[in-house]
């Protein structure tokens, strides 16, 4: 199967599939957070606060991470160069800072974010597929995908530049079928979201759910990196993303163990300001 980038041209304006799905991901994340707040009878406006902080911090963090990896400061002003882990760290710091500003307990912010992050990540990876980016190594499986206009195209030469083995004597310009690792991640994180969405009502202390999310996210990314076409491998076959994933899993395990029982902090005055009174619910 051959896939080409999804691009819409509106005069001088170019809209990519990634840009569209990134917008959908943030909107979906905000909707899921707002729904949780509504279920808990808390201030729904905090969802918009979290999303706004995540958008700004995420884009800045993703760009800075990419510049740190490539050593190319000019990438700050390009349309590409958005690294997920950089976006995760930058977005997380911005959301935490905003929560601190509003005096929302950190554990409440983490709890609300967990399912939304899984769903938003899955949608974001759909965007990667639509712009033919972040694919895997060569494969003969029936669902292998060719990206002749990918970022970069899945040619033998480009795959070899990623230090990926290609069949011997392959013409460097040949477009090879590769693992659609973007779609593998979509499927994995949709399953993670479904589980997290159910677990949110299991009565565990506030914040515990975020630890579960970190475990899911870390394991999923660690495994998919085995198939990814990457050139940032260190310590043998392992990538920087796998090292980061392992750290997230460890943090997630610690959080789930520490917060598996005990008390939950109060939501705080900002979130409770949005509570409806008995009269307003009639």
Image (cartoon, grey):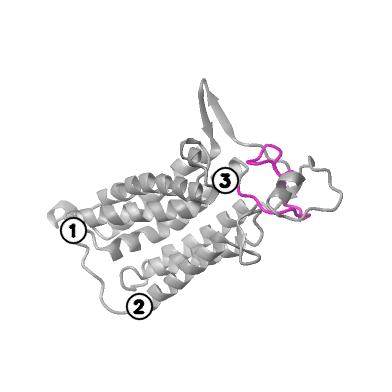
Q: Residues within 10 Å of mark 3 (few under 14, many from 20)?
A: many
Whether residue 130 sits left or right of residue 113 in the image: it is right
Nearest to N terminus: mark 2 or mark 1: 2
**Any mark on residue 258, and which?**
2
Whether residue 169 sits left or right of residue 142 in the image: it is right
Residue 171 in picture, x, y percent from top left: 83, 43
Helix, strand or loop under label 2: helix
Helix, strand or loop under label 1: helix
Judging depth in this view, the residue of 24 and 50 nearest the camera is 50
Q: CA distance from mark 2 to mark 1?
A: 26 Å
Q: Which residue is mark 3?
A: 128
Q: Which residue is mark 1?
A: 272
Q: CA distance from mark 1 to mark 3?
A: 38 Å
Please report the residue visible at 44 percent of the width from the left and 64 percent of the height from the top: 196
Eyeballing the image, is 103 above or below 55? Answer: below
User: Furthest-top residue in view?
Assistant: 11
Report which quarter residue 188 is drawn in: bottom right
**Magenta stretch in the rendered image:** 134-155
| 139 part of magenta stretch | yes
Nearest to N terminus: mark 2 or mark 3: 3
Please report the residue visible at 44 percent of the width from the left and 41 percent of the height from the top: 23
Please report the residue visible at 48 percent of the width from the left and 41 percent of the height from the top: 73
């Amino acid at each position: 199967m051959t896939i080409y980038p999804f691009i819409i041209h509106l005069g001088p304006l170019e809209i990519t599939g990634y840009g569209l799905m990134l917008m959908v991901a943030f909107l979906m994340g905000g909707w899921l957070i707002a729904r949780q707040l509504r279920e808990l009878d808390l201030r729904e406006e905090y969802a918009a606060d979290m999303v706004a902080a995540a958008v700004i911090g995420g884009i800045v963090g993703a760009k800075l991470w990419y510049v740190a990896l490539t050593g190319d400061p000019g990438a700050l002003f390009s349309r590409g160069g958005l690294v997920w882990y950089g976006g995760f760290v930058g977005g997380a710091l911005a959301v935490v800072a905003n929560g601190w500003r509003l005096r929302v307990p950190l554990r409440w912010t983490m709890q609300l974010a967990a399912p939304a992050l899984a769903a938003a990540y899955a949608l974001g990876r759909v965007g990667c597929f639509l712009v033919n980016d972040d694919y895997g190594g060569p494969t003969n499986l029936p669902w292998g995908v060719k990206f002749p206009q990918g970022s970069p195209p899945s040619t033998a030469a480009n795959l070899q530049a990623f230090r990926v083995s290609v069949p011997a004597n392959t013409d460097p310009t040949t477009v090879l079928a590769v693992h659609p690792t973007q779609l593998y991640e979509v499927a994995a994180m949709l399953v993670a979201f479904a589980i997290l969405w159910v677990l949110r009502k299991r009565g565990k202390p506030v914040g515990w759910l975020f630890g579960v999310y970190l475990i899911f996210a870390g394991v999923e990314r660690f495994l998919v990196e085995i198939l990814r076409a990457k050139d940032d491998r260190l310590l043998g076959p392992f990538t920087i993303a796998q090292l980061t994933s392992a750290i997230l899993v460890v943090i997630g395990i610690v959080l789930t163990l520490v917060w598996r029982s005990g008390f939950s902090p109060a939501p705080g005055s900002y979130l409770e300001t949005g509570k409806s009174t008995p009269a307003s619910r009639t």
